[in-house]
Image: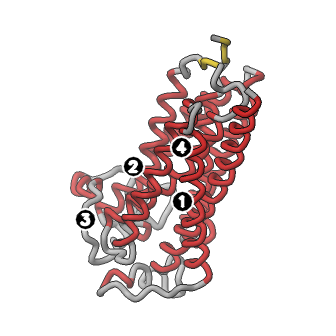
Amino acid sequence: MASLGLRLRKVRALALLLTGLSLLVVLLSAYLRLDGAGLGCADWPACYGALLSGEPQEQHFGVARLLHRAAASLSLLLACTLVWQCRRRPMIESAAAPATLLLLLMLALSALGIWSSDPRLMPVGFLNILGGLGLVSFSWRVVLASRPGSALDQPDEPKLLLRVGAVVLTSTLVLGALLGSGYAAPSCPSFPDCAGRWWPTAAGWAALQPLSILTSVPQAGDPGGVTLNLLHRFSAMCTLILLGTAAVRAMRDEQRRRAAILVLVLLITEVALGTLTVISGFSLGLAISHGVCAAALLAAVATLLRSQVCRQQ
């Protein structure tokens, strides 16, 4: 029993380290993608997405790219160790599944990296953005599953409002990934309206499929870009209302209060960062912070979903 407790502590330490590295990978990936695209460049928005107009340029291995590859490589090695620690006998069942999914996701993203040098491939960018968020989510779920006593506790079913809020948050993140991979920021340069529009047009619904090959950046008022931006904003407001209400209700329970407060703070911060990004003319720092905060919010919601009132089996 003492050896199992030691293994749980090792698994938890590895998972915490992987969560930190995953956040670093998300941050560096966002920087490399957005800085390479020219977000907030001097001749904005004319200079934005100029890399889409021709063949992919040769990658320059600056400090950020080298740090990104080092963090990703170290994460892969640690994930292999994590899975071994979870699956060797006696298996830590509560942590084995998310640890295995984390490793499989890392391997998939590593394979996807073959095509990542071409920014015109929207499916690659879309999967990379969602994959980065998945890295943070799965590694944090291992942290939660390796807490002392987690294998003995049986959590109650999450409240309906919290589950619906988590689903709407996921849809918001998917729409955000479509925006980022489609370089659709310039199509909606104003807030709260979107280039003078308040509702998506029928002509813009085609932008919801992520299998396009990009040839240029959507300009202000582009129907597809306007649709994506407005849907993302509407979904974000629904997420704020649903998860915010669920978090306020959860604060009544002492066991869930800390997780609920964290979700509430990250929700407000995420909406504020998204709003400020548009108002500032798409500041690179704010856009990157918006993406990192989204990953942290996903982990915080996972904590709140798990930290229901537990009962002993």
Amino acid on which disc 1 is placed? Leu
Query: Which of marks 1 and 3 precedes in the sequence?
Result: 1
Q: Amino acid at mark 4?
A: Ala
- Horizontally, is 222 left or right of 129 in the view? left
Q: Secondary structure at mark 3?
A: loop
Relative height, residue 189 to residue 46 (above, below)? above
Q: Please name the amino acid that badge 2 sits on.
A: Leu
Residue 53 locus on image (x, y percent): 31, 84
Query: Closest to the observer: 130 or 170?
Result: 130
Closer to the camera: disc 3 or disc 1?
1
Q: Mark 3 and mark 2: span between their CA atoms?
A: 19 Å
- State the quadrant of the N terminus: top right
Mark 3 surroundings: few (<14), some (14-19) or many (≥20) residues within 10 A: some
Badges 3 and 2: C-beta atoms under 8 Å apart?
no
Residue bearing mark 1: 76
Circle 3 is placed at which residue position? 212
Spatial distance from mark 3 to mark 4, Cα to Cα? 32 Å
Q: Which residue is mark 2?
A: 231
Query: What is the CA distance from the residue labelled 2 to the residue labelled 1?
Result: 35 Å
Q: Is residue 294 visible?
A: no
The colour style of the image is secondary structure
Q: Mark 4 or mark 2, which is nearer the start of the sequence?
A: 4
Mark 4 and mark 1: Cα distance apart in space:
11 Å
Q: Amino acid at mark 3?
A: Ser
Please name whichever residue, 165 or 17, is drawn nearer the observer in this view of the structure: 17
Asked where in the image residue 25 lies, by quadrant, the reply is bottom right
Q: Secondary structure at mark 4?
A: helix
